[in-house]
Amino acid sequence: MRIAINTGGGDAPGLNAVIRAATKAALKRGWEVIGLKNGYGSLFTDKPYVELNHDNVRGITMQGGTILGAANRGNPFEMPVKQEDGSYTSVDKSDEVVQKLSDLGVDAVVAIGGDGSMHIAHKLSLKGIKIVGVPKTIDNDIVGCDVTLGFDTACSIATEAIDRISTTAESHQRVMIVEVMGRYAGWIALHSGLASAADVILIPEIPFTLDSITKKIQEIEHYGREHAIIVVAEGAKQKNGDTFVKGKQIGQAEQLGGLAQYLEKEIMERTGKETRSVILGHQQRGGSPSTFDRLISLRFGSEAIRALEDKDYNKLVVMKQNELKRIPIADVAGKFKTVPLGSDTVMTARDLGKCLGD
Ligand code: F6P
């Protein structure tokens, strides 16, 4: 048995722990393991993979990033190809990817990725590739599972950053707006906003009005507090408004951003209070994984190998109520999990008097 490990899409803390656990569990069974360098796109290069062994997966559980490299332009079905005029077009190279994996003697793939990667994994499985998926994304937006690897670390980083921003907000009597990642789901904003005692938390699931935010800030001032903290998910939208999009490259998901700057101007004008915005950005994805993320990543990696051993192909390894389960990749492909409006976390935020923008 020879397997390939692929880390698709953006990186997340915990990827290396999955690579280590999957490699060790596979080697223990006498299998060979290769890691695809920088995603499926590398299959079209001279050095598409690295042989994984006990030596090169040693000491990586606590390392951020991915030793294999990541690429969010590695969709075999929409591979960006440079044209003569320098512009890019997308080409379906999935059949070539299937052929190249077969040429490398790969019997099965462990695909570690988010919703986009699972969509690709599903389509590759329809072309005959045996795949087991591992749910990775700081956004926590994969359906069918309680939590994805990287989310816990991202929330801790965001919470700590907001804590720090709060002290400077207080010193300067300012409104501080902190934009966090999460794409079209508000998990990071809601969890880190609640944990850091933010006053306003804006998530994509609840369209906001500027009136509601202004009212909350005036209320805070009325009770004698001079500073306020607003946490916004990058994908949050104004009522009847659109998501703030920075741009889109061929073969990539759209890049979100711009909401924090927009709010900075609007809130300053409406409240007369000095307002600043901070975009936390990629630091949420960087650095060492939390204990929780290390552990689920190791568990996911080793379970993926057990799934392959059981010939339980085209499944995604997930955690449900703290137990590992395997669900069809087909059930999650092309979908994403948003924050349920009736969830106890949302109700907790409301009970604590947080403004959710509505
Ligand atoms: O999906 C993970 C994520 O970090 C999102 O939260 C964010 O919108 C996006 O990736 C950023 O992608 P990039 O690394 O391409 O800027």
Image (spheres, grey):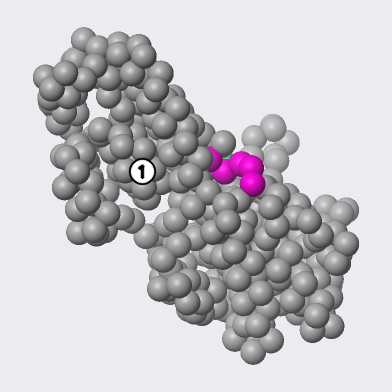
Indicate the position of residue 278 as horizontal and vertical percent values.
44, 24
Main SS of the magenta part reads loop
- Viewed as shown, does residue 355 lie left or right of 96? left
**In terms of depth relative to the viewer, which is nearer, 275 or 310?**
275
Q: Is residue 285 magenta?
A: yes
Q: Indicate the quadrant where residue 126 lies.
A: bottom right
Q: Quadrant of the N terminus?
A: bottom right
Q: How many marks?
A: 1
> Horizontally, is 334 left or right of 290 in the view?
left
Q: Is residue 166 visible?
A: yes
The residue stretch that appears in magenta: 284-288
Q: Is residue 167 magenta?
A: no
Residue depicted at x 67% and y 47%: 65
Q: Position of residue 325 (x, y in %)?
A: 49, 79
Please say if 160 is above or below 169. Answer: below
Asked whether 106 or 172 is in front, the reply is 172
Give the image location of residue 335, x and y in percent: 40, 63
Q: Answer whether residue 235 is visible to the viewer in this image.
A: no
Residue at 36% in and 43% down: 195
At x 60% / y 70%, what residue is drawn? 300
Looking at the picture, does residue 115 appear above or below residue 190? below
In depth, the one of 58 and 265 nearer the eye is 58
Which secondary structure, mark 1?
Answer: helix
- Relative horizontal placement of residue 119, taking residue 269 as reference (left or right): right
Q: Residue at x 43, y 68 (%)?
A: 145
Give the residue type that dot 1 points to: Ala
Where residue 20 appears, x then y in whole percent? 74, 64
Q: Is residue 325 above or below residue 349?
A: below
Location of residue 82 (image quadrant):
top right
Q: Is residue 237 above or below residue 118?
A: above
Residue behind mark 1: 195
- Residue 180 position by quadrant: top left
